[in-house]
Image: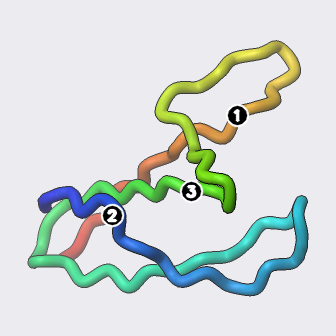
């Protein structure tokens, strides 16, 4: 499957600054096969998730992009 950067997901309810905000995106596969899906979040001021972990001993800033692989039968 070809990458489709910049596609917008639908955002769920915003429960505040420190809450997880749910999102959804309707995925229509082109056919059977293995697909790798990656979502990259951004905030209101334009900051985005990083591709590479910014390591620190306390574990802060661990918000790296995490791909998910799905199999369509």
Say which mark, if any, is on residue 62.
1
- From mark 3 to mark 1, how far is it between C-alphas? 13 Å
User: In terms of sequence position, does the residue under pointer 2 or pointer 3 come before the other?
Assistant: 3
User: In terms of sequence position, does the residue under pointer 3 or pointer 1 come before the other?
Assistant: 3
Q: Residue at x 12, y 74 (%)?
A: 32
Say which mark, if any, is on residue 33.
none
The residue that disc 3 covers is 41
> Where does the image place residue 12, in percent across and percent down from the top left?
67, 84
Q: Residue at x 20, y 60 (%)?
A: 34
Q: Quadrant of the N terminus?
A: bottom left
In the displayed structure, 30 sits above or below 60; it is: below
Element on which disc 3 rests: loop
Rate crowding at label 1 as few (under 14), some (14 to 19) or many (20 or more) other CA atoms within 10 Å: some
Rate crowding at label 3 as few (under 14), some (14 to 19) or many (20 or more) other CA atoms within 10 Å: some
The residue that disc 2 covers is 70
> Where does the image place residue 15, in percent across and percent down from the top left?
87, 77
Q: Please give left or right for residue 15 compared with residue 35 in the image.
A: right
Give the quadrant of residue 64.
Answer: top right
Q: Residue at x 33, y 63 (%)?
A: 70
Element on which disc 1 rests: loop
In the displayed structure, 26 sits above or below 56; it is: below
Give the quadrant of residue 7.
Answer: bottom left
Labels in figure, total: 3
Q: Residue at x 46, y 58 (%)?
A: 39
> Tags 3 and 1 in contact by the CB under 8 Å rule?
no
Residue extending furthest toward the top: 57
């Amino acid at each position: 499957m070809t990458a489709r950067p910049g596609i917008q997901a639908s955002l769920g309810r915003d429960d505040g600054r420190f809450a997880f905000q749910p999102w959804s995106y309707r995925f229509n596969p082109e056919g059977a096969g293995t697909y790798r899906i990656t979502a990259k979040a951004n905030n209101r001021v334009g900051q985005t998730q990083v591709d590479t972990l910014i390591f620190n001993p306390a574990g802060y800033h661990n918000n790296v992009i995490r791909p998910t692989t799905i199999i369509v039968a």
